[in-house]
Image (spheres, helix red, strand yellow):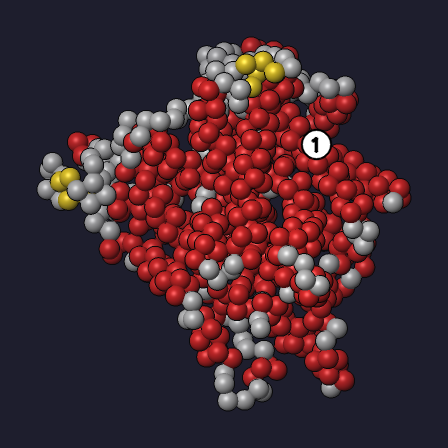
Amino acid sequence: MRVATAESPPPAARAAGAESPWRRFAAEFFEARLAVLGLALLVALIAVAIAAPLVSPQNPYDLAQLDVLDSKLPPGEHSSTTGKTYWLGTDDQGRDMLSGIFYGLRISLAVGVASTVIALALGLVLGLAAAYFGGWVDAAIMRIADIQLSFPAILIALILLAVLGQGIDKIIAALVTVQWAYYARTVRSSALVERQKEYVEAAKVLALSQRRIVFRHLLPNCLPPLIVVATVQVAHAISLEATLSFLGLGLPITEPSLGLLIANGFQYLLSGKYWISFYPGLALLLTIVAINLVADQLRDILNPRLKK
Amino acid sequence: MLAFTIRRLGQSLFVLVVMAFLVFLGVYAIGNPIELLVNPQADDVERARATAALGLDKPFLEQFGIFIARAAGGDLGRSFVYNIPAIQLILDKLPATLELAAVAMVLAIALGIPLGLLAGLKPHSFIGRSIMAGSILGFSLPTFWVGLVLIMLFSVQLGWLPPNGRGETVLLLGVPVSFLTLDGLAHLAMPALNLALFKLSLLIRLTRAGTREALLQDYVKFARAKGLGPGRVIGVHVLKNILIPIVTVIGLELGSVIAFAIVTESIFAWPGSGKLLIDSINQLDRPVIVAYLLVTVTMFIVINFVVDVLYSLLDPRVRLGTVAAH
């Protein structure tokens, strides 16, 4: 959503008159109940993630607060020493699952958003460069993107992490590597289309500088498809990070993301202690579904082909 | 057409060599396997002897040269852990992976195209909306999470299906397969469904989008105006026209289903090549990692090549130069 708010209204639309494009955009967005639900859920999840230290019953990283006697308690049990209620149970180290999930959500969202923003910036620059310079620059950038996109993201991320090792910076690097090509492709193709349009010609006739044309005229008009791709990609990044962490290749165990919490509980699943895996999984699921619901509606609004 | 095929073939070979180099370079950078393989109490002489025996004391480029020369002859090194040829280890595990991938793909196609067509024809009906909601779920749920829920539901709660392993196998043309025995099918059901879900959702979306766009085209209006029945309009005019992108995507997804099997196999302890890869990464079994990646990458490149050539046969507008411009 941060990406969406960064968009300035296209100059052409601003001149259109009474109805502001922002209000029209909001009105169209709120037409779909499911999308509104997704947005509300997403806002709530982000709020919880940001406020995790304030709303968590316990600091899950502080080993002094954990009690081994409380390990693997089912949801709703009370602590044997402090009498506190563990609403979602505890894991094998006696960590309160609710607190673990709040902090895990924080890490998952942070990794997802950070990798998306970096990949977006990288893809934007490379895609615009490819469209603007053409020739061998275009060929080189797009050939690399083509080759990379012909392999599934999970395979590339797995190779990278097998090489780089664990760590939050390494997983972000891997996620950026698998994502940049989507943005570069999207920006390039819309920039090539937009470049032919009359408003660009008009800007050229006005003798505006190249830089002004590229960044003030071309770029804002390339943004709508990019916003859709970016929203979907945040969900992908979160899901991919969770998968890699689940496989034991993502984040270190000291600061678990949702994926690692799930992996941690997986070994207890078959003995019926479902809550250690299930609730972090539920949080992951809600996050991803919420983002996708918002992304779906954005796509419908921003795709002129579906307009009647 | 011939020129296109040759150019595309050259490109494929180039990608293969580059990938081989990158994989080798990357895997070479993973920790020192000697630390894991040699007894921690071993002295330096013992370490040096083990290093020399595995060829790890030679310069990097020489190791790569030896590797390429041997790889060309089908020798991808011996597993540090099992001490058998890595390629043999992969080939032993590959049939299980391919079986899982094939069953998953068949499931996805058999369900995805009819459901997508239905959703595309009646996009605003209850059933159309339900299918789409389901596909959003299937699309956005991480594979491992779905697998987890499947195990929770069918193995732990209901006790219907076994949570791991391959079950009883029978030999089919000398290869062990699970899908011909009841026990094998029970073991196959959950992993196959798990692996199929993502492709299923993708096919539903693709078919639905294609159907919706095709329905607005003049040729469909014309066919209707001619008085053709809805069955013929949909079966011939709509389906035939949306099938080209669908077939292409199915072809391309064949490879990715094998990659995603890494996750599914890890959850259901399916004894395939994907699980072997994860185990090998954890054990720093370098030759097996390299062999797995090379085999998978080669499969990908072959699949992409075949799909591209077939696509250009189906749709003559496709040529290398114009593909990039779309």
Q: Residue at x 20, y 40 (%)?
A: A75
The N terminus of chain A lies in which quarter of the figure? bottom left
Residue A73 shown left or right of residue B114 in the figure = left
Q: Residue at x 50, y 65 (%)?
A: A298
Q: Position of residue B227 (x, y in %)?
A: 68, 62
Count up the numbered dots: 1
Asked if residue B8 is positioned above or below residue A214 in the image, the reply reads above
Residue assigned mark 1? B298
Q: Nearer the viewer, residue A121 or B61?
A: A121
Q: Nearer the viewer, residue B314 or A53?
A: B314
Residue A256 shown left or right of residue B174 in the figure = left
The C terminus of chain A lies in which quarter of the figure? bottom right
Q: Chain of mark 1?
A: B
Q: Nearer the viewer, residue B156 or A145?
A: B156
Q: Position of residue B282 (x, y in %)?
A: 49, 26
Q: Residue at x 45, y 49 (%)?
A: B134
Asked if residue B97 is positioned above or below residue B88 in the image, the reply reads below
Residue B300 shown left or right of residue A37 in the figure = right
Q: Position of residue B297 (x, y in %)?
A: 67, 33
Q: Position of residue A208 (x, y in %)?
A: 72, 82
Residue B124 shown left or right of residue B316 in the figure = left
